C-alpha cells in the first residue's frame, strides 16, 4: 500500500514537471521568451552605456536605505533611554538620532538634485539616439507607419524606456537592501516576528505573477490608444484649413470624443483591475501588520522586550512588508518598459539605409560640377510589396544639360519613379545608376542622394525665416548666394519687397505665402543645394506659363551641366524638354512629338 502511494506521488510530481516543461516549451515556440529576452538585452545596452551614472544613482539610493535602517535602530535606543530602560549614553543616542535624521535630509536633497540631472541627461540622450535611428531607417520600410505613431514612439515610448533604464536597477537595489537589512535585524532579535512579517509574501508574489500578463495587455492598449491620439491630433491641426472649408468640425469633434472614450475605457478597466489587486494585497498587508503589532504587544506584556524594541519591531515589520512589496511592484515597471521597448524595437530593427558608397558619391558630385551627372534606368521592374506591377522593363536616361520629362495619368508611377531615382524605393529587378560622363558610375542608393535636389509635390517649407529655410539646403551659404538662388527661381522679386526681407517668418507650412510663391521658394532652396541633378515633381504647377518658362531657363543658364528631371502635365514644360517618357498601364516608354500630342489631347 505504501509503495502504491509512493508511485502515485512520483507520478503526480512527474506529471506536474512535464506540465511546467510543456508551458515553458510552448512559450519558447510562441517566441515569447525569445522576445522578452531580446527586449531586456536591448535595454541592457543602454544600462551598460550609462553604467557609471546609474551606479552613482544606486549608491545614493543604497545610502538612503542604510540610513533608514540605522534610524530605526537609533529610535529603539532613544525610546529605551527615555523610558528609563537604558539610561547609559543618552547624550550619545540623542546625538546619533539627530545626526542620522539630518543625514537623511542631506542625502535625500542630494539624491533629488543629482537624480534630476542624471534623468534629464539619460532621457534626452536615449531619445536622441532612437530619433536618429528612426531617421536613418530605410524609407520604404518606414512608409507603413503613420508619422504621429512614430512621433509617439520616439517621445512617449522612448521616455518610458529611459525612465525604466534609470530607475529599475536603483529601485531594485534599494528595495533589496531595505528588505535584507530589515530581515537580518528582525531575525537577529526575533525569528518568529520575522516569519510573521513575511507571512503575506507568498500571496503577494502569486498575485503579482498572475496579474503580469494582464498588466502587459493593458499597457499595450494604453500605448496604442495614446499613439492613435497623437496621430489624430497631428492630422487635425495639419489639415485644419481643409476641415473648416468642408464644414467637417462636427465629424472631427465626434472622432476626438470617440478616441477619448477609448482611452477612458482602457484607463477605467486598468484602474479597476489595479484597485482590486491593491485592495487584496493591502488587506493581506494590513492583517499581517495587525498580527505583528499584536505579537509585539504580547511580547512586551510578557516582559520579554522593551518599549524601544517593540517600536523597532513594528517599524521593521512595516519596512519588511513595504520593501517586499516594492520588489514585487517592479514587475509592472518592467512590463511597461518591455512593451515600450517592443514598440521601439519594431521600428529600429527595420532595414537601415546603406551608406557604403558615400565617399565615392561625394567625389562624383564634386566632379559633376565640371562634367555633370547622368542618370540611367535599365530593364527596371517595380511593384509595391509584391502587388501589381507599376511597370516592367523600364528604360530611362537623362544626361547633363538636358531637361527630361515624365508624363502619365495620376497614380501611374511618375512620383514612384522619382522616389526610385532618390533611392527611397528599390527596384524589384533591373539597374538604376548615375555617373560622370566618361567616368565611374554608382548604383542608386541612399549614398547617391547627395547628388539630387528634390522639389516634391505640395508644400515643403518649414517654420522659421526665409533665410533659415534656405540654409537648410546649404548651411554655409552667404547672403549673395541665397539672393542669386532666389533670383534664379524668380522669388527675389517678391522677397525683397517684404518688410523683413530674408528674415520674414515663413510660418508653419508657409501659410503667409501663395502657392506660387511657396513653389518658387522651394525651387530656390533646391538650387542653392547646388546638386548636379534637379528633380521637380509638379513643382511649377502653381506658376503661370511665363514665370514657369523663366524659371526653367534660369535653371539651365545658372548651371549648364545640370540634369533636370520633371514630372508634369503642362505642355509649356514639354517644349523645353530633350526627351519625354510616358508611364501608363504598367508601361514605360519614350514618346515622340506625335505620341506627346495624343497624350495631351487625351488628358
Image (cartoon, grey):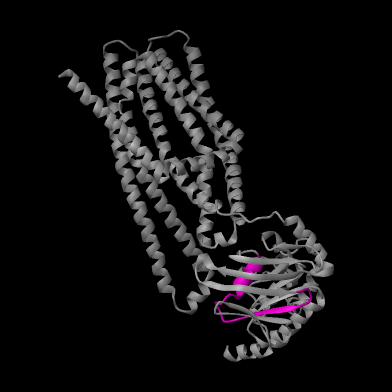
> In this rendering, is residue 76 above or below 239?
above
Q: How many marks?
A: 0
- Residue at the outermost right position: 370
> In this rendering, is residue 146 above or below 240?
above
> Where is residue 9 drawn, in percent x and y?
23, 25
Is 274 placed left or right of 585 in the picture?
Answer: left
Is 107 placed left or right of 310 in the picture?
Answer: right
Q: Which quarter of the figure has residue 60?
A: top right
> Where is residue 116 drawn, in percent x and y?
57, 40
> Where is residue 61 drawn, in percent x and y?
52, 30
Can residue 458 be seen here? The reply is: no
- Residue at the outermost left position: 1
Can residue 159 be seen here? The reply is: yes
Residue drawn 43% across and 23% down? 180
Residue drawn 73% across and 73% down? 524
Between 77 and 137, the one lying in front of the other is 137
- Residue range (magenta): 399-422
Is 399 placed left or right of 171 in the picture?
Answer: right
Between 189 and 112, the one lying in front of the other is 189
> In this rendering, is residue 35 above or below 103?
below
Amino acid at each position: 500500500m505504501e509503495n502504491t502511494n509512493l508511485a502515485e506521488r512520483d507520478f503526480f510530481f512527474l506529471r506536474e514537471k512535464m506540465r511546467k516543461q510543456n508551458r515553458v516549451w510552448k512559450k519558447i515556440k510562441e517566441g515569447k521568451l525569445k522576445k522578452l529576452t531580446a527586449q531586456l538585452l536591448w535595454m541592457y545596452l543602454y544600462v551598460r552605456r550609462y553604467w557609471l551614472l546609474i551606479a552613482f544613482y544606486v549608491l545614493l539610493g543604497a545610502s538612503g536605505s542604510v540610513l533608514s535602517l540605522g534610524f530605526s535602530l537609533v529610535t529603539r535606543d532613544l525610546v529605551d533611554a527615555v523610558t528609563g530602560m537604558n539610561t547609559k549614553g543618552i547624550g550619545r543616542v540623542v546625538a546619533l538620532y539627530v545626526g542620522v535624521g539630518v543625514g537623511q535630509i542631506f542625502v535625500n536633497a542630494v539624491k533629488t538634485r543629482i537624480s534630476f540631472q542624471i534623468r534629464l541627461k539619460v532621457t534626452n540622450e536615449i531619445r536622441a539616439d532612437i530619433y536618429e535611428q528612426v531617421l536613418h531607417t530605410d524609407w520604404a520600410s518606414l512608409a507603413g507607419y503613420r508619422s504621429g505613431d512614430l512621433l509617439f514612439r520616439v517621445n512617449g515610448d522612448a521616455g518610458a524606456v529611459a525612465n525604466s533604464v534609470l530607475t529599475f536597477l536603483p529601485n531594485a537595489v534599494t528595495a533589496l537592501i531595505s528588505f535584507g537589512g530589515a530581515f537580518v535585524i528582525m531575525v537577529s532579535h526575533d525569528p518568529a516576528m520575522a516569519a510573521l512579517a513575511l507571512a503575506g509574501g507568498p500571496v503577494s508574489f502569486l498575485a503579482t505573477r498572475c496579474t503580469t500578463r494582464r498588466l502587459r495587455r493593458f499597457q499595450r492598449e494604453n500605448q496604442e490608444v495614446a499613439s492613435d491620439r497623437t496621430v489624430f491630433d497631428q492630422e487635425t491641426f495639419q489639415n485644419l484649413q481643409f476641415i473648416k472649408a468642408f464644414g467637417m468640425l462636427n465629424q472631427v469633434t465626434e472622432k476626438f470624443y470617440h478616441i477619448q472614450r477609448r482611452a477612458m475605457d482602457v484607463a477605467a478597466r486598468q484602474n479597476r483591475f489595479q484597485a482590486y489587486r491593491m485592495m487584496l494585497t493591502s488587506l493581506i498587508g494590513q492583517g499581517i501588520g495587525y498580527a505583528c503589532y499584536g505579537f509585539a504587544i504580547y511580547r512586551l506584556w510578557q516582559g520579554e522586550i522593551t518599549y524601544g524594541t517593540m517600536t523597532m519591531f513594528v517599524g521593521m515589520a512595516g519596512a519588511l512588508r513595504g520593501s517586499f512589496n516594492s520588489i514585487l511592484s517592479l514587475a509592472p515597471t518592467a512590463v511597461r518598459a518591455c512593451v515600450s521597448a517592443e514598440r521601439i524595437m519594431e521600428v529600429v530593427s527595420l532595414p537601415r539605409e546603406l551608406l557604403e558608397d558615400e565617399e565615392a558619391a561625394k567625389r562624383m558630385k564634386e566632379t559633376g560640377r565640371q562634367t555633370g551627372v547622368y542618370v540611367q534606368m535599365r530593364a527596371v521592374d517595380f511593384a509595391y510589396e509584391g502587388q501589381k506591377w507599376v511597370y516592367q522593363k523600364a528604360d530611362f536616361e537623362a544626361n547633363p544639360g538636358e531637361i527630361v520629362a515624365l508624363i502619365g495619368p495620376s497614380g501611374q508611377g511618375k512620383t514612384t519613379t522619382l522616389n526610385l531615382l532618390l533611392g527611397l524605393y528599390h527596384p524589384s529587378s533591373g539597374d538604376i545608376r548615375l555617373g560622370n560622363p566618361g567616368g565611374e558610375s554608382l548604383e542608386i542608393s541612399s549614398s547617391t542622394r547627395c547628388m539630387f535636389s528634390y522639389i516634391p509635390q505640395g508644400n515643403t517649407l518649414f517654420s522659421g525665416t526665409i533665410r533659415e529655410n534656405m540654409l537648410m539646403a546649404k548651411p554655409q551659404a552667404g547672403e549673395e548666394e541665397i539672393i542669386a538662388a532666389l533670383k534664379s527661381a524668380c522669388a527675389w522679386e517678391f522677397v525683397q519687397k517684404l518688410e523683413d526681407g530674408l528674415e520674414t517668418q515663413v510660418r508653419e507650412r508657409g501659410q503667409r505665402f501663395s502657392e506660387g510663391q511657396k513653389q518658387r521658394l522651394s525651387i530656390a532652396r533646391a538650387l542653392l543645394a547646388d546638386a548636379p541633378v534637379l528633380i521637380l515633381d509638379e513643382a511649377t504647377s502653381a506658376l503661370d506659363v511665363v514665370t514657369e518658362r523663366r524659371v526653367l531657363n534660369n535653371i539651365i543658364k545658372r548651371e549648364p551641366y545640370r540634369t533636370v528631371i520633371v514630372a508634369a502635365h503642362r505642355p509649356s514644360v514639354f517644349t523645353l524638354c530633350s526627351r519625354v517618357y510616358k508611364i501608363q498601364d504598367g508601361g514605360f516608354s519614350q514618346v515622340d512629338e506625335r505620341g506627346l500630342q495624343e497624350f495631351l489631347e487625351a488628358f
